[in-house]
Structures are given as C-alpha cells and as structure tokens.
Image: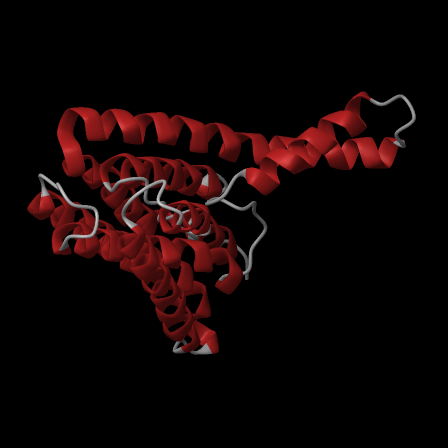
Amino acid sequence: MKSEDTVLAAIAGFVDTLSFVALFGLFIAHVTGNFVLIGAGVAGFSGGVLLKLIVLPAFVGGVVLSSLLVRSLSGRHARQGARMLHAVQAVLMFGFCFAGVWATPISQPDGLPAIVAGVVGAIAMGVQNAHPRLIKRAGVPNTVMTGNVTQSILDVIDMLSATTEIGVRAAARARFARMMPAIIAFALGAVAGAMGMLYVGFWALLAPAFVLAGLVFTTGEQDRVSTSGHP
C-alpha cells in the first residue's frame, strides 16, 4: 500500500506524543530520546528515571519478537510477514490502551501502573521500528523524522540550486515527494495524540489500534491483485 508509511508515521507521532504527555515525558517510538531524559533525571532535573530505563529493554523485546516471528515464516509465506507484524502491533496497541486506562490516574512516574503501560507501549513501537528493517520494500522511515527532515532540506537545496545537474534535481524532487507526506503525517499525528490524551485519555489509543488492524487486511493487497492478474 503506497500510503502505508504515511499512516505509520501518523501512528508514531500520535503514540509518541500521547505517551510523552501521559507518562511523564516518556518516548516510546523515538525511544533513544529517553537517553537525554535519563541523563537529566540522574542529574536531578526530572523524574521517572526508572520508567525510562525499563522501557529500553521492553523496546528491545519488541524488536526481538518481530525478528523471531518473521524468521519463523517459510519463504513461501514471507510476504505475509508485514500483515503479521501489523497484527502483533495492533494487539499490543490495544494492550497499551487498556493498561493506560487501568493505570489512570497515574500519579507516580515510577509506580507499577505507569511502568506496565509504558512497557506494553514500548514493545508495540519496537515492533513498528523493526518492521521496515525486516520486511524489505521501498519506503521511508516512519517512526523518527529527524533523518527525513534533514534529507528533505538537502533535497530542497538541490532543487533550488542552479548548479544542480538535471538527474540529481529529478532524484531530489522524487525523494522529497516521498518523504513529505510522512513528515506531515507525523506532525499531525503528534497534535492528534496530544488532543486525544487531553479529551479522552488513554482511550485515544483505540484509534491507532484500529488503524493497525485495518492495515492487516490492506497491506500487500495491491501486490496480490496485480500478481494474480498475470499468468
């Protein structure tokens, strides 16, 4: 599905912002951002150090789980790997939602309710981060936008420069067109995640959970149809 990266980018922005707002500054999609917060916490500038430390192995667990599941598929069924990972992430996202609802109101960043919710969410986003590295296809990164934004700026420079060769300019234009939808979707997802947390709390996570469930049935469908139309 051509829009898959755009949808996943919106999910990443949504979930990362919601977790940041709800779980005392915790990143679960851009999980390495927690290193900065852990450093600040160790120096006494913020709390929730234990929570941020625990979600790191949980995130690793999501990546490992994804790898084991994809490796378990035979070559004949390898194309079903994307759907399987979407399904696993959808289940985990529902789990994150219900764990957060159970934990509400969360008063302590290092209490058991916050840790349970954070761990389930981190595993879910570990699956999404591992997905494009395990299922090879043309696409753009959809969980962290720093690289996409940097490349897009460089592409704009190439497109505007009078000294850029025609072929380089065409490649920059095509790459920019691929990356911008994901960047915009991530930003809009971040706003939606914050607003969702504000108005309905952790129940807002039902939205990305159902979207992931929908991807289970739509991912790869175009390839299947086009392939079946040829002898």
Image color mode: secondary structure
Work out which quarter of the rendered image holds the C terminus and state it.
Answer: bottom right
Q: Residue furthest front?
A: 44
Q: How many marks?
A: 0
Where is residue 178? Give x, y as percent: 60, 36
Residue 148 is left or right of residue 222, and the answer is: right
Does residue 149 lie above or below 224 as drawn?
Answer: above
Q: Nearer the viewer, residue 80 or 98?
A: 98
Q: Residue at x 88, y 29 (%)?
A: 164
Left or right side of 7 for 50: left
Front residue (pair 45, 72): 45
The residue located at (13%, 56%) in the rendering is: 112
Picture quadrant where residue 37 is located = top left
Query: Where 128 falls versus 166 (above or below)?
Result: below
Residue 84 visible, this orientation: yes
Is 203 placed left or right of 213 in the picture? Answer: left
Percent from the top left, x then y, of residue 82? 41, 59
Return the x and y of residue 174 as percentages of the image width and height.
Answer: 69, 34
Q: Position of residue 89 (x, y in %)?
A: 30, 55
Do we see residue 83 in this rendering?
A: no
Q: Which quadrant of the figure has residue 189? A: top left
Which residue is located at x 27 percent, y 54 percent? 51
Vertical comparison of 146 with 192: above or below: below
